[in-house]
Structures are given as structure tokens and as C-alpha cells.
Amino acid sequence: MSAVILESSLVHYEAIGRGRPVLFLHDWLGSWRYWVPTMLNLSSSYRLYALDFWGFGDSDKVRTRYSIEGYVYQVSLFMDQMGIPAVPMIGHGLGGIVAVDFALRMPHLVEQLMLVNVPLSGNQISRTLTGFTGGDNPAARILGRRLNAYEEVALEASKTDGDAVVQSVQSFMSQDLGEQLEDLDLPIMLVYGTQDPLIQIPDSNLFEDLDYNVNTFLFDGAQHYPMLEETSKFNRLLLDFLIHKDQWDAIQLKDSWRRRMR
């Protein structure tokens, strides 16, 4: 296990591969671990980093920083401590929200964003998640039997501090990520599983106001973890995005993907 101390608090992370750095940020119900299949796939060409937010995985429980702002600060400290330059950020759920806020505050440190199953407003989060009030193993309580389908999530689900889920969800509810995306001038890919029980796909009208730097890909039939449910297709899409950035016509489309064209 790799770890750094940031302002007297332990932060667990893992890094594999060599080459251009890429940073992965996890969601409310997991840890760094479910990024492993994707990280291994890209490790021959990239240096992949994944950390555990405070309150998740093997990072310390720092309850005063269980918020979007607190996690943005954590990512900033981590990148500075590790000497990581500007990177593509791959954020899932909570991690995607943190990535957007980070890019708004420190645009010189973000090259491009892939946002996976990220709510653009609080009303797109299911009541199952917003109604969670705390307790042990949030993933088991919120996903129920579905958790058994995600071994990489289930392995560390019991490590999550329920307060980290509650407080970080609450800290997001008044945000409007749709408006925030309009202020970002970098390539942004939005990815959604069409059957996600936790995050609703934004209304298509919302995308009309976004510039060409933002594109949306849908994985038909996938739920909350397309990187685990459609691993090879997800990895191919991510690799194409890393290589081509905003050259959307060069990103290969498969039958299982649909892209909103502008």
C-alpha cells in the first residue's frame, strides 16, 4: 500500500505504469480499487494514479473535510506532494464533481475531463442515495444485491465512513454542474450508463447550451459502473479520448455507444 501524509492525515493511493500521468477519482460507494482493470489496461503508455478520498478506502477519516471543497483541496495537496503536472482527470460520481470544481479553481492543472455517471444537479441523484442517513457499509445499504456484481467495489465497501457519503452528497445539492461546465475551456467527455439506478441522465436540452468541447456518450444497458460492466469498451473509449482529446470525429463509435452530435 502506498500512502502520503497531507496536513497530518494519511491519504492512500496507488500508481502504476509509465508515461503521461492520468488521475482517477472514485465515487460515493467505492474506492481506488475499482479503477484497477482500467489502470492495468493503460499502464504500458501512461502513469496512472488513483487515490482514496478522506473517509473512503484506506485514507484517514477526516470528518471536517467530507465535502466537495474538502476533496478538491485534498486533490490539490496530493498533486503538489507527488509532483504531478497538469493531467487528464477521470472522475466517477463524486469524483467527477470534484474534478469539475478542481478544474474551475485550477484550470492550469487539468488537460481534459472524463466524467462518468456524474449528476449535473442534485435532482438527478436518486432518493436511495440522497436519503442515506449514515451507518456502516453504505454501498451494501444503497446497492443491495447489486453490490455482488461488482467485486472490486465490494472488496472495500465496508471501509467507507457513512458520514463521508452523507456530507459530500449534501455539499453538492445546491450546485449546478451544467452551468459550471459552460465555464470550462477544455475537452470534456460525459459518460453515462443508461440503466444507472443512482444517477439520472441529464435532460438532452441541457446539452444544447454547451460548447463543442463537451460531448456525451451513453452505454446502453450499463448501470452505475460502466468501467466494470463494459470494461473493454470503456477502456477503448477512454484511450481514444486520451489520444484524440477534442477531435470527436476521431473517437471510434461502437454499437453500444451513442454520441450526442452538435
Image: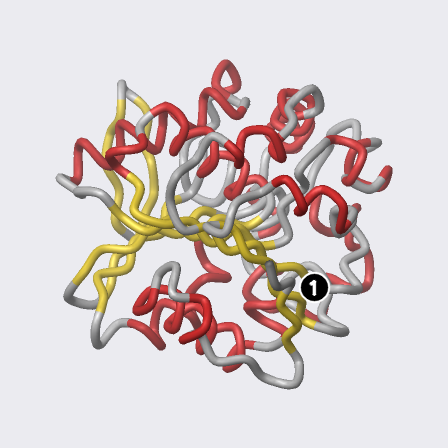
**Residue at 53% from the left image edge and 34% from the top image edge:** 182
Q: Residue at the location (60% across, 45% down)?
A: 93
- Residue at the spot x=60%, y=32% of the render? 177
Left or right of residue 143, residue 120 in this image: left
Q: Secondary structure at mark 1?
A: strand
Across and down, in percent, residue 84 comes to 18, 43
Above or below, 253 relative to 36: below
The answer to whether residue 222 is above or below residue 29 is below
Q: Residue furthest bottom?
A: 255
In front of the other: 124 or 1 = 124
| Residue at the outermost top position | 64
Q: Nearer the viewer, residue 233 or 4?
A: 233
Residue at image mark 1: 193
Q: Quadrant of the C terminus?
A: bottom right
* Residue 200: percent from left, percent from top: 78, 49
Q: Is residue 3 shown above or below 40?
A: above
Label 1 CA crowd tier, 10 Å (few <14, some 14–19, many 20+): many
- Residue 69 is situated, as x and y percent measured from the top left of the image, at 47, 20
What amino acid type is highlighted by mark number 1?
Gly
Question: In the drawing, does residue 196 fall left or right of residue 14?
Answer: right
Residue 103 point in image, percent of width and height: 38, 33
